[in-house]
Image: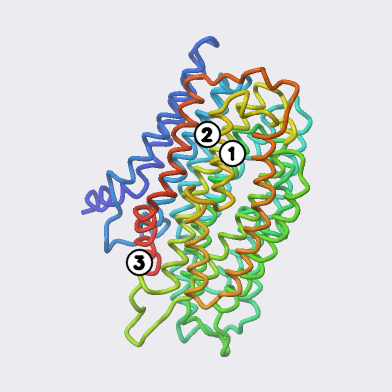
Amino acid sequence: MGEFNYLQQLPAIAPEIGLTILAVVVLALDLYLPESRRKGTAYVAAFGLLGLAIVPFIWSPVSGIDSYWGGMVRYDVLAQVFKVMILLAAGITCLIAVGTHDLARKGEFYLIIIVSTLGASLLSAASDLIMIFVALETLSIPLYILATFRKGDPRSVESGMKYFLFGSFASAILLYGFSLLYGFTAQTNIYAIADYMTSPEFGLNAAPIVVSLVLIFVGFGFKISAVPFHFWTPDVYEGAPTPVTAFVSVASKAASMAVLMRFLIAIFPAEFVINGQVMQEFWIQLVIVLAVISMTIGNVLALVQKNIKRMLAYSSIAQAGYTLIGIASIQTMYLTDGMTDLSQTAAAQGVAAVTFYMFMYTFTNLLAFAVIVIFTEATGSEKISDLAGLSRRNSWLALAMTVGLLSLAGIPPAAGFFGKFFLFNAAVTAGLEWLAIVGVLNAIVALYYYLVVIKVVYVDRHEDDEVPIALNMTTAWVLGATTLSVIALGVLPQAIYNWALSSASTLFA
């Protein structure tokens, strides 16, 4: 019987087992391959990660079985979607790094990427406070190392130090919030905590719960780059090696969004009331405030940036604000016999919108940063003004950059259009029409600075207009695959959206 249970639960962590094996393989290759052949390590890591993205489809989540491995993880459709997303992001990041002169043969770089991916994958399915914290640190500590990977570059060292210091403080605050929840309930499983706090014997007032919730929001707010916990983002984006910036911008944000949704819905559902105060109303208002200030400050500060990576850093802050609109729309509706049809509720649409947006954002941001990697390797510049004439130096590179920026701006047929549409529609369904209007106005502001870059690429002249920028086979495939993915998600979004919508039913179970 024990063996049967073990085998039954093994698929829940199959991708993580594969990542552990892949990490050992990459370490061995780095140790024993001669310097001239170590570029092959990058391809082993990249295709290994891309191959592991298939594993969640081979062993799909089993309906009716919620908790695995002693309640530490839940393998449901939400975890499946985000694991696929994270593994694809890591694999593409490794392929992007192959195009750099200083990372292509650094086996330890790919090993650290794999370890960080392991943490992100576990985080997306974590359902226990201990597992959440361990997975979060497994994700974060390798990223601190990667941010300082270019030891000879003062900007890289500075960015890594800032990332480490801010991250350490955020982790300590998050852990303190967790410790308060554990102290109130004597439970670490988030569903057990919810059961205890909604039971008659739970006698606390709302104040300590609100304090713990705010502390936990600080920790997660740091990870998703939400204002006012965003101070590290521009410096880290600019100073870290560009492939690292690409990975941080998508994998860390995606995993944190997944666990944030799971945590809030599980521990603070609509029926959790203390002294007449519905706790879900409190965190929804908190999310709304963070969404508005993140969108506004991110877009306004992006307007004045001269460095393309800093501009995308503030864009990332704004994108976090858009995504929080979807989380704010998660207002569950209950009848006497339970929740109404999930497909008709704002809650389901909010979960689906956030999930689709992160899926779209992963490919979009990786596409934009892939172009930046190729451009900076050829020119040594990250200034927006130096992108002038890119359309004449390499028309395919200019087209890829345009598709990526239009997707971030939410312009069809790129995927960002439906990404924002689903988020704003979820807000309207939840009765948050004014929040959707604020999101639309911010999207209009953002359109300006994205179009400025496109104008520079196609209209402005540069002294090196006639100097072509070559693409190697690997970078050409990365650009082609991510560009087609962004367009495909913009033309045919329904398949991924329906997949994301199915994750809501398991998230509320």
418 versus 157 height, above or below: below
Q: Position of residue 475 (x, y in %)?
A: 51, 25
Q: Is residue 421 visible?
A: yes
**Contact? badges 1 and 2 (CB < 8 Å):** yes
- Which residue matches tag 3? 505
**Contact? badges 2 and 3 (CB < 8 Å):** no
Instruction: Locate the C terminus by quadrant.
Output: bottom left
Amino acid bearing label 1: Ala
Q: Position of residue 98 (x, y in %)?
A: 54, 23
- Which residue matches tag 2? 93
**Contact? badges 3 and 1 (CB < 8 Å):** no
SS state under label 3: helix
Amino acid bearing label 2: Thr
Please name the residue shown 56% across and 59% down the image. 323
For disc 3, the neighbor class at 10 Å (few under 14, some 14 to 19, many from 20) is some
Of 265 and 427, nearer the camera is: 427
466 versus 249 height, above or below: above
Q: Where residue 246 is drawn, which disc sits there?
A: 1
